[in-house]
Amino acid sequence: MGSEGEQLGIVNTREALRIAAEQNQDLVEVAPTAKPPVCRIMDYGKYKFEQSKREREARKKQKIVNIKEVKLRPNIEDHDFDVKARNAIRFLEDGDKVKVTIMFRGREITHPELGRQLCVRLAEVCKPYANVERDAKVEGRNMIMILAPKTDAQRETEKKRESRGPKAANVETPE
């Protein structure tokens, strides 16, 4: 291939190098496994620079997902639960994952269902903002659940589903 993207056909290596030298370009092997190998005439330094520039742009647009932790106890009061839930929602809105840890002390570990109920309650409160990535699971004296933030697309489809939902539910099918 030429520097403008045009096809030069099958050319031997010396001829291709001569054409590249005349244009002050480099001969770059694009597909070495093809029969015959495909080469392209281009400014390799410029190509590498543009490629690194694209990679930098892609890195700028990446969102680094952090894991924030919310710690609860099985016998938490309602107001304290609301504060923890608000913090979890704030973390999710910022695009971070939330690790919900329920700490059991002493004999509380004999009632893991209380911790599971608390996890379900928190997941229900955070439902518009998060998906449960990992269900509640006891690990030692802690119960851990992980919530992942919903993407904008997921929120949009959920809003559409909610707006159609009640209308579709009230329609009776004739028998």
Image (spheres, rainbow, N blue to C red):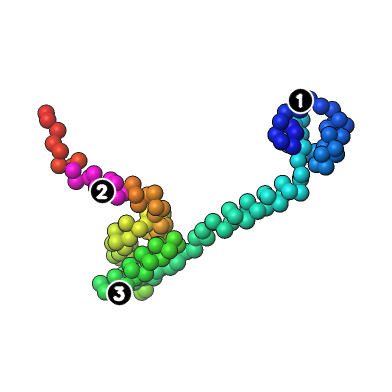
**Earlier-in-chain disc, 3 versus 2:** 3
Mark 3 vs mark 1, foreground winner is: 1
What is the C-alpha distance between the residues marked 3 and 2?
30 Å
Q: Which residue is mark 2?
A: 162
CB contact under 8 Å: marks 3 and 1:
no
x then y, percent, for residue 75? 28, 72
SS for tag 2?
helix
Label 3 crowd bin: few (<14), some (14–19), many (20+), radius 10 Å? few
| Magenta-tinted stretch | 158-167
Position of residue 64 in the picture relative to residue 47 (left or right): left
Name the amino acid type tagged 2. Glu
Whether residue 165 is visible, yes or no, is yes
Residue 95 on image: x %, y %: 44, 60
Is residue 18 positioned above or below 100 on the image? above
Give the residue at x 32% y 72%: 83
Q: Dividing the picture into quarters, in which one does residue 147 lie?
A: bottom left
Q: Which mark is residue 50?
A: none
Upstream in the sequence, badge 3 or badge 1?
1
Mark 1, other Cα within 10 Å: few <14 / some 14–19 / many ≥20: few
Establish if 53 lies above or below 6. below
State the residue position of label 1: 9
Tell whether 137 sits left or right of 65.
Answer: left
Residue 61 forms part of the magenta stretch: no
Mark 2 or mark 1, earlier in chain = 1
Viewer-proximal residue among 162 and 25: 25
Residue 39 image point, x, y percent: 76, 34
Residue at the limit of the structure toward the left, as seen here: 175
Disc number lying in front (3 or 2): 2
Q: Residue beneath label 3, please?
A: 80
